[in-house]
Amino acid sequence: MGKPLRRHALLALGVLSLSTAAILLRLYRGHPLTAAGWRLFFLTPWAVRRIGELRALPRRSLLVLTGAGAALAAHFTLVGPCVSERPGWGTI
């Protein structure tokens, strides 16, 4: 597959994934933290393949990424259960 075609295919896959994620998560009946864990599980192969790129980042960038990850973890932990327990809030 050529580079432009591959990029377009990956872009289409990303758009499709993002546009259906909310619907699929709304239909999911498990705990919100479980859904967040599955998301991380599917991202792990990507991160492992790029570990060299992550190690090459400056220390400041790694600290910013770690802080962003901690903020996202706090978001999933605090907001996810609240939204899933209130009907209609998942569409906000």
Image: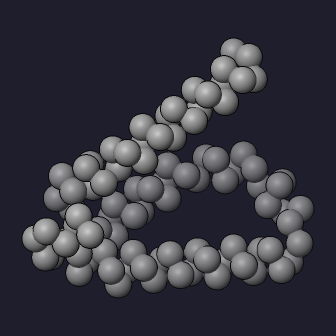
* Quarter of image, res 63: bottom right
Residue at 30% x, 54% y: name it. Answer: 22
* Quarter of image, res 84: bottom left
Residue at 69% x, 73% y: name it. Answer: 65
Residue at the limit of the structure toward the left, as seen here: 87
On screen, residue 2 above or below 59:
above
On screen, residue 35 above or below 79:
above
For the N terminus, give its image quadrant. Answer: top right
Could you tell whether 22 is left or right of 68 in the image? left
Q: Position of residue 72 (x, y in %)?
A: 50, 75
Q: Position of residue 30 (x, y in %)?
A: 21, 62
Residue at 77% x, 74% y: name it. Answer: 62
Comparing 20 with 28, the one in front is 20
- Answer yes or no: is residue 14 visible: yes
Could you tell whether 2 is left or right of 89 in the image? right
On screen, residue 24 above or below 70:
above
Q: Position of residue 17 (x, y in %)?
A: 42, 42
Residue at 57% x, 26% y: name it. Answer: 9
Comparing 5 with 26, the one in front is 5
Q: Position of residue 76 (x, y in %)?
A: 39, 75
Could you tell whether 71 is left or right of 34 in the image? right
